[in-house]
Amino acid sequence: MFPEYRDLITRLKNKDHHFTRLFDKHNELDQKIWNMEEGTEVATQLEIEALKREKLHLKDELYAVLKKANGD
């Protein structure tokens, strides 16, 4: 996710608790969605789609933080 910001992500994860929390939550949702789609966790399609929307919202928030921290 956001390979162009790899170094900035590393720096923010070490000093910005809010960014770290968003980043970790995004990764947790990504894994949970993957597990649901693979059938290792039981879920309805509506539940999966709701989690995907939440994950996308987190990604948007992460991108906004990255752009601001990068001075974009």
Image (cartoon, helix red, strand yellow):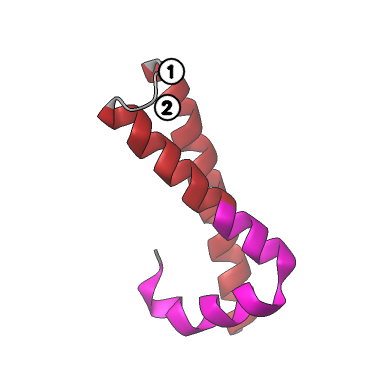
Q: Position of residue 20 (x, y in %)?
A: 64, 64
Q: Main secondary structure of the magenta part?
A: helix
User: What is the three-letter code of the residue carrying label 2?
Assistant: Glu
**Residue for badge 2:** 49
Asked whether, in this view, residue 66 is left or right of residue 35, the answer is right
Residue, x 53% and y 75% (percent of image)? Answer: 9
In the image: residue 67, left or right of residue 7: right
18 magenta-colored: yes
State the CA–CA distance, disc 2 to disc 1: 5 Å
Residue in the image at 41% along x and 68% along y: 2
Tag on residue 46? Answer: 1
Mark 1 and mark 2 in contact (Cβ < 8 Å)?
Answer: yes
Q: Is residue 66 above or below residue 21?
A: below
Under tag 2, what secondary structure?
helix
Secondary element at tag 1: helix
Instruction: Tell me which corner region of the image, top left, top right, bottom left or bottom right, holds residue 22.
Output: bottom right
Q: Where residue 32 appears, x then y in whole percent?
A: 44, 37
Residue 70 part of the magenta-drawn span: no
In the rendered image, residue 45, in percent from the top left (x then y), is placed at 37, 18
Task: Assess disc 2: are there few (<14), some (14-19) or many (≥20) residues with their C-alpha within 10 Å of its C-alpha.
Answer: few
Measuring 49% from the left and 32% from the top, which residue is drawn there?
Answer: 51
Across and down, in percent, residue 47 comes to 46, 21
Q: Residue furthest front?
A: 40
Res 65 visible: yes
Quadrant location of the C terminus in the rendered image: bottom right
Does residue 23 appear left or right of residue 47 in this picture? Answer: right
Report the front residue among 42 and 52: 42
- The residue at the point 44 percent across, 78 percent down is 6
The number of numbered badges drawn on the structure is 2
Mark number displayed over residue 67:
none
State the image quarter where residue 66 is shown. bottom right
Range of the magenta residues? 2-24
